[in-house]
Image: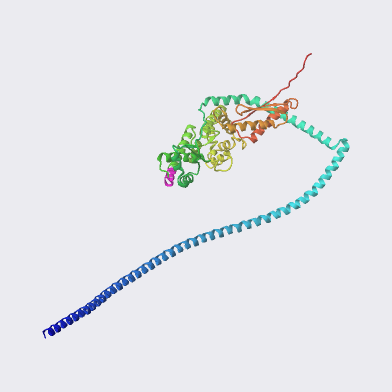
């Protein structure tokens, strides 16, 4: 019973343990399932949250990309529109230029058509004239042939023989008559005028003792270093272009160290450019704005200096009543040179010599001084106005009511117009004296040699000339002729012809003396 009870108790205990164990296992399984499901749901919620966040981020990224794309598209469209507008404007400008060019071409075509019609009319008229002339030439040739046949029958000579005889006689008679007339006229003029003219000219030269007027216009500017030369040129040449535009000169920059050359026809512009460039180099600030400022400042200084020089020259020559423009032109002559001679100093010198010679001849010294001072005023603008400086100067002074004597002296001091007053030859003589006196002028070696060669070439071109030599720096030509071909009277004519040809073909300061030598040598031997 007790065992039975114990067995029952043990059985119950085992059953209880088994049930407890099973219950625990079931509970554990249920708990594990519950915990796993909770973790799964938490993980799922987290995954859904991450997925939502990722989806929001991707949507934001897409929106931002869309916004950037839209902005880029707008910016690109604006650039394209600007470029299209610029292209349209350029095309419109091109169309305008083409239309203008087309109009010009049409006008030129109309003018050419008109000229062509005119030429056709002239050509038709010329053809008609040619026909008439051809008929007249035939008639004239027939008349000449008939007369020639009659002359040949009368003389009994051949055609060529008669022609040579006639031409040789005519040439011989004309040459001898011309030589005799020239010799007689020159001797008569020399006898009456040589002594008095020599006395007057020597007196004028002795009484006027001026310094040598030879001058040299400097067109080179010293550059302290190659770095400064580069600054003068500027980036891509902008400084030098601005300088040339502001001054109107050409600036030459080459490999020569330390030098920049300023070149211009206008001497005043060249002087303004030289001074302005020196100021820029000293200042060191070289850029387009500064260049324009310095050039304008220098131009005003030079213009003021020109007026001062003109007033000083008028006072020195004692010439009053000049117009402001005349004074300005006189001042500009200070920057003008002729064969190295300063034209302003030359004009003052001519004024003094004219007065001295006028006083010796009993003329008005005041008018003579005025003629001498203004005789080369046209050289101040001869690079701007077409024509020779005598006529230019006369036209300028005519506008300022100068007297006829002064105008004729200015226009005729080189023989371009006939002398109508006694002051014109005085100015011509004083001009030649000032230009030809020692130290008055100078020229380059190359031009000097060419001038001597040209003088000798002109002399050698005449028949009968054996040799010629240019001496005294080209102021005299010695010509030796063949005595068997040229007699004494013909020698005078050849000398005169050589002088005339030199006057017509050459440019030279002062005058050139032509001395012709004819020598007869008789040689015999006594045996």
148 and 410: which is toward the camera: 148
Residue at far left of view: 2
Q: Choose top left, top right, bottom left or bottom right for residue 3.
A: bottom left
Residue 207 visible in the picture? yes
Read off the magenta span: 287-296
Where residue 282 appears, as percent x and y from the top left, is 41, 39
Is 161 left, or right, of 343 in this rendering?
Answer: right
Where residue 301 appears, as percent x and y from the top left, is 43, 40
363 and 45: which is toward the camera: 45
289 within the magenta span? yes
Q: Choose top left, top right, bottom left or bottom right for residue 49.
A: bottom left
Residue that appears at 19% across and 81% down: 19
Task: State the quadrant of the C terminus.
Answer: top right
Where residue 478 appears, as percent x and y from the top left, is 66, 26
Residue at far bottom of view: 1
Is 464 left, or right, of 444 in this rendering?
Answer: right
Asked which colour scheme the image uses, the reply is: rainbow
134 within the magenta span? no
Q: Is residue 16 above or below residue 424?
A: below
Residue 366 visible in the picture? no
Q: Magenta-highlighted stretch: main secondary structure?
A: helix
Where residue 399 appears, as percent x and y from the top left, is 53, 42
Task: State the quadrant of the N terminus.
Answer: bottom left
72 and 420: which is toward the camera: 72
Is 80 left, or right, of 383 in this rendering?
Answer: left
Q: Is residue 75 above or below residue 233?
A: below
Count of labels shown? 0
Is 196 left, or right, of 486 in this rendering?
Answer: left
15 and 472: which is toward the camera: 15
């Amino acid at each position: 019973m007790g065992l039975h009870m114990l067995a029952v108790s043990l059985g119950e205990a085992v059953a209880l343990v088994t049930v407890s164990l099973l219950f625990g296992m079931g509970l554990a399984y249920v708990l594990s399932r519950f915990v796993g499901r909770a973790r799964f749901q938490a993980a799922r919620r987290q995954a859904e949250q991450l997925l939502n966040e990722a989806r929001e981020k991707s949507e934001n990224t897409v929106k931002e990309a869309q916004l950037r794309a839209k902005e880029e598209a707008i910016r690109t469209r604006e650039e394209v529109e600007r470029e299209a507008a610029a292209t349209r404007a350029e095309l419109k400008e091109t169309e305008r230029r083409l239309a203008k060019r087309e109009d010009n071409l049409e006008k030129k075509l109309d003018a050419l058509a008109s000229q062509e019609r005119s030429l056709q009319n002239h050509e038709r008229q010329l053809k008609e004239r040619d026909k008439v002339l051809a008929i007249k030439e035939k008639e004239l040739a027939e008349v000449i042939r008939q007369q020639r046949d009659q002359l040949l029958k009368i003389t009994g000579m051949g055609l060529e023989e008669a022609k040579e005889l006639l031409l040789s006689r005519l040439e011989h008679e004309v040459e001898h008559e011309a030589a005799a007339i020239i010799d007689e006229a020159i001797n008569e003029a020399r006898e009456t005028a040589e002594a008095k003219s020599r006395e007057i000219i020597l007196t004028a030269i002795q009484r006027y003792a001026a310094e040598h007027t030879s001058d040299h216009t400097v067109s080179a500017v010293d550059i302290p270093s190659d770095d400064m030369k580069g600054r003068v040129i500027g980036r891509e040449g902008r400084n030098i272009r601005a300088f040339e535009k502001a001054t109107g000169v050409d600036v030459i920059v080459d490999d020569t160290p330390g030098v920049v050359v300023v070149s211009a026809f206008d001497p005043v512009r060249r002087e303004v450019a030289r001074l302005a460039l020196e100021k820029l180099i000293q200042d060191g600030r070289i850029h387009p704005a500064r260049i324009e400022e310095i050039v304008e400042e220098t131009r005003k200084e030079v213009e003021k200096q020109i007026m001062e020089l003109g007033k000083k020259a008028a006072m020195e020559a004692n010439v009053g009543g000049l117009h402001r423009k005349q004074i300005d032109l006189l001042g500009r002559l200070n920057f003008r040179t002729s064969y190295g001679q300063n034209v302003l100093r030359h004009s003052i010198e001519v004024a003094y010599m004219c007065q001295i010679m006028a006083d010796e001849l009993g003329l008005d010294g005041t008018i003579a001084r005025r003629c001498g001072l203004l005789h080369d005023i046209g050289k101040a603008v001869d690079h701007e106005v077409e024509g020779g400086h005598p006529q230019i100067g006369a036209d300028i002074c005519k506008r300022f009511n100068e007297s006829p004597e002064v105008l004729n002296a200015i226009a005729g001091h080189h023989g371009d117009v006939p002398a109508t007053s006694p002051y014109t030859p005085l100015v011509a003589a004083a001009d030649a004296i000032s230009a030809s006196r020692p130290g008055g002028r100078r020229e380059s070696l190359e031009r000097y040699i060419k001038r001597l060669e040209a003088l000798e070439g002109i002399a050698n071109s005449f028949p009968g000339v054996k040799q010629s030599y240019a001496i005294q720096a080209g102021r005299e030509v010695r010509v030796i002729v063949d005595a068997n071909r040229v007699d004494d009277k013909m020698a005078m004519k050849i000398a005169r012809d050589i002088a005339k040809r030199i006057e017509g073909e050459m440019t030279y300061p002062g005058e050139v003396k032509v001395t012709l030598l004819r020598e007869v040598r008789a040689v015999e031997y006594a045996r």
